[in-house]
């Protein structure tokens, strides 16, 4: 079982929007980066991800789950190679974990979020997952 981090602008699609979609979830679409697309294709149903607000917030705010594995992105033009997944909310973090807090933690210095700040879909190691969960007030 792999772990992931998905980034979104909260003005476009926020944690509250994800929660409001309920059990049917929401397509995670509009990804236009080949490395991020590769990660979307690797994501399996049932795997979990950190829901990360970009922009002014820059923080992990919740945990989501992959409800449906990759399929053609409905927002892409016909013939374009982009994919989407369907995501659902699992639980909010009791205490959001900021990018600054992650960068300040030496144990997270190799986390993709620190090294590849602009990548919108990122893998997260099991150790990183546990550590960020604890920082956010969850058991992990």
Image (cartoon, rainbow, N blue to C red):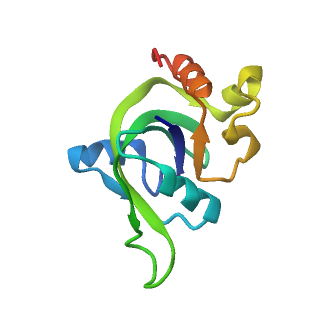
At a point 70% along the width and 47% down the height, the residue shown is 117
Where does residue 60 sit, x and y in percent of width and height?
54, 35
At a point 50% along the width and 37% down the height, the residue shown is 2
Q: Residue furthest bottom?
A: 78
**Left or right: where does residue 82 sit relative to residue 101?**
left
**Left or right: where does residue 138 sit relative to residue 135?**
left
Is there any visible trace of residue 72 in the rendered image? yes
**Left or right: where does residue 21 sit relative to residue 11?**
left
Q: In this picture, is 118 found above or below 128?
A: below
Is there any visible trace of residue 28 in the rendered image? no
Where does residue 44 sit, x and y in percent of width and height?
41, 46
Q: Quadrant of residue 132?
A: top right
Q: In this picture, is 111 found above or below 131?
A: below
Q: Quadrant of residue 38?
A: bottom right
At a point 45% along the width and 17% down the height, the residue shown is 138
Q: In this picture, is 64 found above or below 83?
A: above
């Amino acid at each position: 079982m792999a772990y992931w981090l998905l980034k979104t602008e909260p003005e476009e699609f926020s944690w509250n929007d994800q929660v409001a979609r309920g059990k049917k979830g929401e397509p995670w679409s509009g990804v236009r980066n080949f490395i991020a697309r590769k990660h979307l294709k690797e994501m399996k149903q049932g795997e979990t991800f950190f829901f990360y607000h970009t922009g002014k917030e820059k923080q992990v705010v919740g945990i989501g789950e992959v409800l449906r594995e990759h399929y053609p992105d409905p927002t892409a033009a016909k013939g374009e190679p982009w994919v989407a997944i369907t995501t659902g909310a699992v639980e909010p973090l009791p205490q959001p974990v900021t990018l600054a807090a992650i960068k300040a933690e030496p144990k997270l210095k190799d986390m993709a979020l620190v090294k590849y700040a602009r990548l919108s879909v990122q893998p997260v190691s099991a150790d990183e997952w546990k550590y960020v969960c604890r920082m956010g007030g969850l058991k992990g």
